[in-house]
Image (spheres, grey):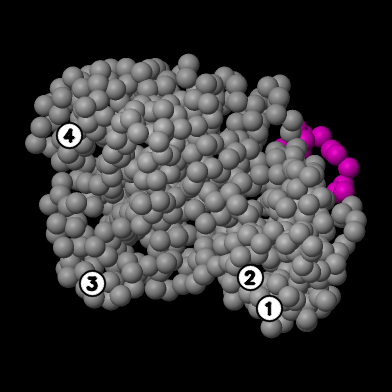
Amino acid sequence: MAPHEKHAAPLVTVTADDVERLCEFLYRRTGMLFDGSKRYYFDRRLTERMLATRSRTFQEYFANLRADAEHEIEHLINAFTVNETYFYREDHQLRCMTSNLLDEIVLRKGPDEPIRIWSLPCSTGEEPYSIAIWLMENWPDVDRHNIEIIGSDIDTRALAAAAEGIYGERALMRLSRSIKERYFRPLMDSTYQIDPGLRDSIRFTKVNLVDTPSMAGFRNIDIVFCRNVLIYFDDASRRLAAENIYDCLRPGGYICLGHSETMSRISSLYRVCRFPDAIIYQKPEAEDGSR
Amino acid sequence: MAAVENADRRRRILVVDDSSLVRLYYHSALERAGFAVEQAINGIEATEKVLAQRFDLLIVDINMPGMDGFSFVRDLRHRKADIAALPILMITTEADETDISDARAAGVNYYLVKPVSEADLVRHATALAGPAS
Amino acid sequence: MPLVKRDNPLPAGPPERSPVADLESPDIEVRWRAARGIAPEPKFVTSLATALERESASRVREAIITALIRIGDRSSAQVLLPYLRSQDAGVRTAAIDALQAMPDATAPFMTSLLGDADSDVRILAAELVRNMPAETATSLLASLLDRESHPNVCGAAVEVLTELGTPTALPSLQACAARFAGTPFLPFAISHAIARISRAEG
């Protein structure tokens, strides 16, 4: 314990019942789903938030959370989503892309039709570059098709950083040395810059998920990666974003959400698809008729 | 997880209901009777679980947020054969003729109206899933 | 390298038409675009209401409801209320999801919904109480328990009290447990609610 904590009262214990109540609440508000195996993870995050809000009991904390006092829901979500972005994050979805999704997608493509993949939001670019690198490293058919990768975000500074493509060591921690050597150039200050050819081949554009006109220029997208952003939206905005993305996808196109997210509190437009590496949602291929 | 599942010869039931108390009630009654029980809060979560794990019976409510029970059942019946053939017990608050015939049309195997006693629950689960282990 | 970059975004779609008129189009895509293109302003609630009544495609229905949620005023909530009684489970689900997204607009109708003649509506109404502040919600649900004879409505109320109930609910919970002693499920549910509420204070 740090010196200033010498006289602190012992931490309030959080029971399994409290954790369950919190999970249910988080699910209803955000669609985030956590299974029982994540309990340890919960205890720590919850205790952090209780300390930060000076709540003496779980009940006190929960009451504030329900009322969303001081945007506590957002703080809690932040505590549960890893905000640090890095290359090859949640790579099970990238694996699903090359193991399953692309096979389905190429079946529907004409000879010169490009495969279109959209990272939205792309933040500072780790995700779209990861997609590109992963494809080149893992997809045997990568040279047989034209692939268009787009990275979009509402934050123009993040987009500028993405276009520049300079990253610190931490962002590259999941990449092998050979991948680092193939796609990055080390700079003087221990940072790395993405190879210019790769940087130039990705389109970075400003887009606002809930602004329908800003999404209207994107059509016939095959895969959208929309991870860990919809959980922060309110119900109306989530629905609108889901509808906007729906229009951007081609029939049969896929949308990947973040690891703990589910479509169930977002929209009923999509169909659930289960692949060995991931659960992905799909825009129906054909209208299945009215109900 | 896989290793445990192989050694576990219990019949597996997925309970789909948006009420945590209902899920808890069925869960304890069915586990006491020797079944292995998983839970889902609505049709979308249930679909994800059904596609990822083996089950011998689904117990499904109708009124759930996001995806109602009928939509869930209808969607399931369109998927590949082993999933389309899963026995489904619908237990719900709805009691009129339209609901019962809708259920039959959607491919539900049996229909019970809440509240259901533990004994009835176990009896019908056993009839549809087979003995617990 | 197989990566290609297109520098210009795709051209914009066809010029804007009147979304309100298009809500009645026989073409599902036209109706979909219309529902999505309507500005979220109260003056369009009536047109959206009429469209919702006639709409059979679930995707367009979702878009109309999104528009109503975005408007989010009392008149929007009023449009959605009758759909709680629909014979179609999907429609009921869509309506309740929408009303849950607009708690302020729904609040004035809660007392009447909780007292509705149809027990199925009272069950759905109890779920809507979840979005209200804990004290008001507890008070509404405790009153409901005091006068409710249908076990499934009580069950729905108890479920919500388990999340947000304050100790003022305890007497009504206990009385309800006594009334339904020996019946399946409800005594179990109530004992959980009571344990949860008592533990929270302890």
Q: Is residue C130 above or below residue A133?
A: above
Q: In the picture shown, does residue A185 fall above or below C111?
A: below
Left-right relation of C101 to C44: left
Q: Report the magenta residues as a range.
A: C12-26
Q: What crowding class fits label 1: few (fewer than 14 Cα within 10 Å), some (14-19), or many (20 or more)?
A: few
**Residue C23 within the segment the image draws in magenta:** yes
* Residue behind mark 3: B8
Q: Residue at x 58, y 49 (%)?
A: A83
Q: CA distance from mark 2 to mark 1?
A: 8 Å
- The crowd level at tag 3 (other Cα within 10 Å; few <14, some 14-19, many 20+) is few
Q: Residues within 10 Å of mark 4 (few under 14, many from 20)?
A: some
Q: Which chain contains the residue that carries disc 3?
A: B
Q: Amino acid at mark 3?
A: Asp
Give the residue type that dot 4 points to.
Ser
Q: Which is in the foreground here, disc 4 or disc 1?
A: 1
- Both labels 3 and 4 in a single chain: no
Q: Secondary structure at mark 4?
A: helix
Q: Which residue is rendered at x = 85% and y = 70% of the image?
A: A197
Nearer to us in this view, A172 or A113: A172
The answer to whether residue A132 of the structure is visible from this angle is yes
Circle on res. C191: 4
* Residue that badge 1 annotates: A178
Query: Which amino acid type corresponds to the residue marked 1 in the rendered image?
Result: Ser
